[in-house]
Image (cartoon, rainbow, N blue to C red):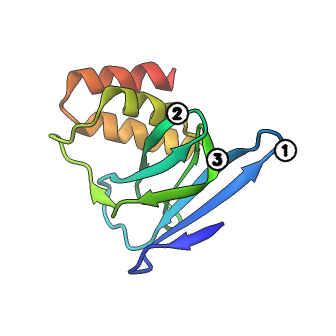
């Protein structure tokens, strides 16, 4: 399944993996990200195992190509999801610790984990920095 933001700057590609139960991943590509400040998108989706899940997906412009991340969608059933507008991460950015733990643990590639390291270096919340460190081990 492929979708784009209304302004066309963000592209979302949801893939299924395996047969029963299928697993899902999301590739987020954001065009027009300038500079080195990480951007964050909030993805909310229906879960097969309980209440709605919230996943934080960070992106930062890489050396080549647009900003992108690749993540697992734990518990996703294949339909019923939405995403926020991508917003810059700042020193005072704060999120729920359990959501951060789930989100960091969902990273599927080194580029996404590196972006989480950049988020960690930028935020001042010591508790969230600790959660990111634990999940990146």
**Of the pair 90 and 103, the residue shown nearer to us:** 103
Q: Residue at x 27, y 36 (%)?
A: 95
Q: Position of residue 117 (x, y in %)?
A: 40, 36
Query: Which element is circle 3 on?
Result: strand
Q: Earlier in the sequence, mark 1 or mark 3?
A: 1
Q: Earlier in the sequence, mark 2 or mark 1?
A: 1
Q: Please indicate, yes or no, whether residue 62 appears anywhere in the rendered image.
A: no
Q: Earlier in the sequence, mark 2 or mark 3?
A: 2
Query: Which element is circle 2 on?
Result: strand
Q: Residue at x 40, y 22 (%)?
A: 133
Q: Nearer the viewer, mark 1 or mark 3?
A: 3
Quadrant in the picture for residue 55: top left
Asked whether, in this view, residue 126 is left or right of residue 77, the answer is: left
User: Gap between marks 2 and 3, in whole Å?
Assistant: 11 Å
What residue is disc 3 on?
Answer: 77
What residue is disc 1 on?
Answer: 19
Q: Residue at x 26, y 49 (%)?
A: 89
Callout 2 crowding tier (Cα within 10 Å): few <14, some 14–19, many ≥20: few
> In this picture, is 46 found above or below 135?
below
Q: Which mark is residue 50?
A: 2
Asked whether, in this view, residue 16 is left or right of residue 110, the answer is: right
**Of the pair 126 and 50, the residue shown nearer to us:** 50
Q: Which mark is residue 61?
A: none
Q: Are marks 2 and 3 in contact (CB under 8 Å)?
A: no
Query: Which element is circle 1 on?
Result: loop
Q: Position of residue 121 (x, y in %)?
A: 29, 35
> In this picture, is 55 found above or below 28?
above
Asked whether, in this view, residue 22 is left or right of residue 129, the answer is: right
């Amino acid at each position: 399944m492929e979708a784009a933001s209304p302004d066309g700057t963000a592209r979302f590609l949801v893939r299924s993996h395996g047969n029963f139960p299928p697993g899902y991943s999301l590739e987020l590509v954001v065009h027009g990200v300038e500079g080195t400040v990480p951007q964050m998108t909030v993805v909310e989706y229906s879960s097969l195992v309980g209440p709605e899940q919230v996943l934080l997906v960070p992106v930062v412009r890489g050396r080549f190509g647009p900003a992108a991340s690749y993540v697992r969608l734990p518990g996703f059933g294949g339909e019923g999801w939405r995403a926020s507008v991508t917003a810059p991460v700042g020193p005072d950015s704060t999120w729920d610790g359990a959501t951060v733990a789930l989100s960091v643990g969902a990273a599927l590639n080194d580029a996404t984990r590196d972006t989480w390291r950049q988020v960690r270096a930028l935020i001042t919340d010591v508790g969230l920095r600790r959660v990111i460190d634990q999940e990146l081990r």
